[in-house]
Amino acid sequence: MVVRMSEEPTAAEQSVPQRTVFGHPIGLVNLFGVELWERFSFYGMLTILGYYLYYSTTEGGLGLDKATGVGIVGAYGGLVYLSTVLGGWIADRVLGMERTVFYGGFVVMAGHIALALLPGLTGVGVGLVLVAFGSGGLKANASSLLGTLYPKGDGRVDGGFTLFYFGINLGGFLGPLLTGLLQREWGFHYGFGAASIGMALGLTQYVIFRRNLGTAGRQAPNPITAKEARPLVLAVIVGLILIAAAFATGLITLDNLSIATTCVIVVAAIAYFARMLTSPKVNATERSRVRAFIPLFIANAVFWSLFQQTFTVLAVYADERMDWNILGWTAPSNWIGSIEPVWILVLSPLFAIMWTKLGNRAPTTPRKFGLGVIGMGLAFWLFLTMAGGEGKSSPALMVMVIMAAFAVSELTLSPTGLAVTTQLAPEAFRAQMMALYFFSIGIGTSTSGTVARFYSPEREFVYFGVTGAVAILAGLVVLAIAPRISRQMVGVH
C-alpha cells in the first residue's frame, strides 16, 4: 500500500530486531496475541451488554427500556474510542507506546472484574469506565506500535496489518461464543468474568514475549514538561466537574448519552485536526497528508455507523427476528457477534496474500475506502430480502451470508485504514494520529446507538433501505474524489 516514501526510518524503527516470522517482523506475534485476548474480552462483554441492560430483572438483567439499553451500548463503544486520545497522548508525551499497551491491559482487566462482581448500575458504571480507559491505552497504541515495526515504504505493511486483523477477529469470534453460553447457563456475571480471564491471558503472553518488540515504542517521542503538565491537570479537573454537573442537572441522561457522545467526539476530532494542521512540529509534507486523511476519516465514520449496529440494531434483530434453531438446539442470540469474525478468519489470509502479491498494483487507499463503504451499504440492503416477516422468521443461514458481505467490506477498508494512518501520521503525533483514526470509529459506534432508536420490525424496509443508501452514496463520493485525495497523500499509495 505504501510506496516511494522519502523519510529515513525513525530510531525506533531502526532498533527493532530483524528476525521475521512468515516474512514479517517477529514483534507482530506478540501484538497479535495481546490484541486477540483484548478483543476476546471486549466483544465477549459487548455482545451480552445490551441484553444485560434491557432484559427484565427476572431474566437477570437490569430492566431498562430497550431503546435506552442499545443507546448506552452505542455510547459506551463511542467512549471507548474517544478514550484513545488519552491513550495516544500518554504514549506520545509520558510512557511511550509499549508501556501504555501494558498498563492499559491491566485497567481493562479491572473493568471486567468490576462488571463481574459489582451488582446493578454501579457495576456497569465502574466497569465500563475502566474498560473504556484501558482500551483507550491499549487499542490505539498496539496498532501504532505495529506500524513502527515496518519502515516507511515497506510493501509488507498491508499484509502485516491484515494478519494482525486476523488476531482481532479470532478473539472477536471466541469471546461471544463463551460469554453467551455462560450467560445463558449461569448468568450475566459469569460471562463478564470470562472476559476478565481472557484479558489476564493476554497480559501474561505480552509479558513473556515483550522482548520481541526490542526498543520499539519504549520512549515518548514528545515528552511533556512540568510547565506543560500543570494546566493540563487543571483542565482535566474542570472537565470532570463539568461532566458531573451535566449528569446532575439532567443535561446528559442515559437516554441521550449516545447523541452527547457523538457530539463530543466530533468536537474533539475537529480540535485535533486543527492542532495537527497548525502545529510547528508538523512540516508541509506531513500537513498535506493530514488533509488527505480528513475525507478518509469521514468515510470511516459512515462505515462503522453501519458495521457497529452488530451490537445495537442487529443484537435486537438476533434476539427477536432470527431463528437460531440448529438441529433442535437453540443457540444464544449474542452469537450474532461471532458470525462475522468467522468470515474474517476465513478471508483475512486470502486478503493478506492478495495485498502482498499485488503490492503497489493494488487499488489506492482512497479507492479501498470507497469500495468498503459501498459494500457495507449493499450488505444492509440484503436485509430487505427478509423485511416484513413476523416473529423469529429470519433464517440464520441468510444472516450468515449477509455477514460475509460485512467481512469483505471490513477487510477492504479497516486493515488498510489502520495501516495508512500510521503512514500518514506526523512524527510528533504518531500515536495520537491513531487515536484520531479511532475517533472516526467512535463517531460511527455512538451513531449506531443513536440510529438504533429508529429501528423496529415494522419499519425494517425503510430502516435498512435508507441506512444502506446513505452508505452507498458516501462511498461513491469517495471514489469520485479519490485521485485528489491520493495527490495530497504525497508518496503514500
Image (tube, grey):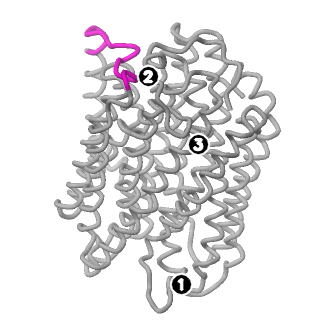
Is 224 part of what is drawn in magenta?
A: yes
User: Is the magenta region chiefly helix, strand or loop?
Assistant: loop
- The amino acid at mark 1 is Asp
Please name which of the two marks, 2 or 3, marks the residue nearer to the observer.
Answer: 2
Q: How many marks?
A: 3
Classify 10 Å Cα crowding around label 3: few (below 14), some (14-19), many (20 and above): many
Is 164 part of what is drawn in magenta?
A: no
Which element carries disc 2, helix, strand or loop?
loop
Residue appearing at x 34%, y 13% in the figure:
223
Cα distance in 3D space between marks 2 and 3: 22 Å
Q: Are marks 1 and 2 in contact (CB under 8 Å)?
A: no
| Residue position for label 3 | 415
- The amino acid at mark 3 is Pro
| Residue position for label 2 | 16
Which residue is outermost to the bottom?
Answer: 328
Image quadrant occupied by the C terminus: top right
Give the quarter of the image for residue 396.
Answer: bottom right
Give the quarter of the image for residue 231.
Answer: top left
